[in-house]
Image (tube, rainbow, N blue to C red):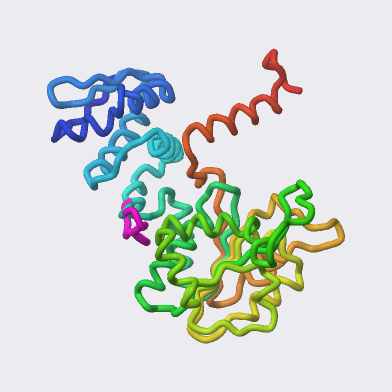
Amino acid sequence: MEQRIEIDRLEQAVNIFGSFDENIRLIEAEFQVVVTNRDGELRINGEPEAAMLAAKAIHALLTLSSRGESIGEQTVRYVIGLARSGQEEKVSELTADVICITAKGRPVKAKTLGQRQYVESVLKNTVTIGVGPAGTGKTYLAVAAAVAAFRDKQVNRIILTRPAVEAGERLGFLPGDLQSKVDPYLRPLYDALFDMLGAETYHKYVERGNIEVAPLAYMRGRTLDDSFIILDEAQNTSREQMKMFLTRMGFGSKVVITGDVTQIDLPADKTSGLKEAVRVLRNVEGIGIRELTDQDVVRHVMVQRIIKAYDDYYNYNGKGKKR
């Protein structure tokens, strides 16, 4: 069966095909079809269902291309997933409003439907709890929303915090003052802020007290008015810590809590504050809970390949048989 798609401009075809036709090759491999560009139209040949799905994926990519989006392998794979699940028409939602512009002029916006729902929840609710695996943009998008709110003078301060928990290894005694000791635990938050603001602007706001990055223990006993507060790695909070943090919020403030409930580094006798908060606060007005999935993971393509290789190795031995 052959499906035909008209191409209005040559630039669209170039964007869709990608460097060395890598995007089209990926579509051909995924759907077992052959795609050719002739006389101003794309021709898709293959089994009827496969050709139809490939055409839907290409139509979705054309929608993104017509709105100025660059098409890379990551985008193609996500659109293929939408086409397989019959949601390709929702791809237009991914070109919605930009959340923030980084220091280098790059627009930050949701790259998956799950991320879009997460951002909408952050903008709509006073408290948003974002739960999902690493790489889904929970922290990065929250920081982008915080910087946007700060630039629009909706808040006077940005406060980012996370529990100081080692990631498996024991670091021992660290040199320097207290701030130097906790900085390694807060590095992911610094990285996101540097990307949004630039290092020089970041340090200027820190000196003025407009931005604060601190371990969760520093939050005790405070009331935070007119602030955008982000708690990262919240799965490693205890029940008591989570309640303490949630009650720090003052007037005019917004809170975002992020974490992955499958990665908990608390002692066995401690209950994760994040898991309990999701259960307790699910029906509280003004609190949005958004669960992101593996489909919302946005990583470098090579990182995705490495993760897949490890998953394949541990699920199968070298002979291709299940362990």
| 310 or 57, nearer to the observer | 310
Say whether residue 227 is magenta: no
Residue visible at 69% across and 50% down in the picture: 262
Of residue 222 and residue 67, the one placed in the foreground of this image is 222
Q: Position of residue 230 (x, y in %)?
A: 56, 67
Q: Which residues are magenta?
A: 95-104
Residue 118 image point, x, y percent: 48, 60
Which residue reaches farthest right? 269
Image-based side of 201 in relation to 232, left or right: left
Report the front residue among 231 and 14.
231
**Image quarter of the N terminus:** top left
From what the image shows, is residue 181 above or below residue 87? below
Q: In the image, residue 305 lies at what x, y percent?
A: 53, 30
Of 194 and 165, nearer the camera is 194
Name the main secondary structure of what is drawn in magenta: loop
> Picture coordinates of residue 68 (x, y %)?
24, 45
Relative to 70, say whether 189 is above or below: below
Residue 285 falls in image quadrant? bottom right
In the image, farthest residue toward the top: 319
Q: Is residue 299 left or right of residue 6?
A: right
Q: Quadrant of the C terminus?
A: top right
Queried whether the magenta region covers residue 101, the answer comes back as yes
Residue 51 image-quadrant placement: top left
In this rendering, would 271 be left or right of 99?
right
Looking at the image, which residue is at 67% across and 24% down? 313
As drawn, 133 above or below 278: above
Q: Is residue 198 above or below residue 20?
A: below
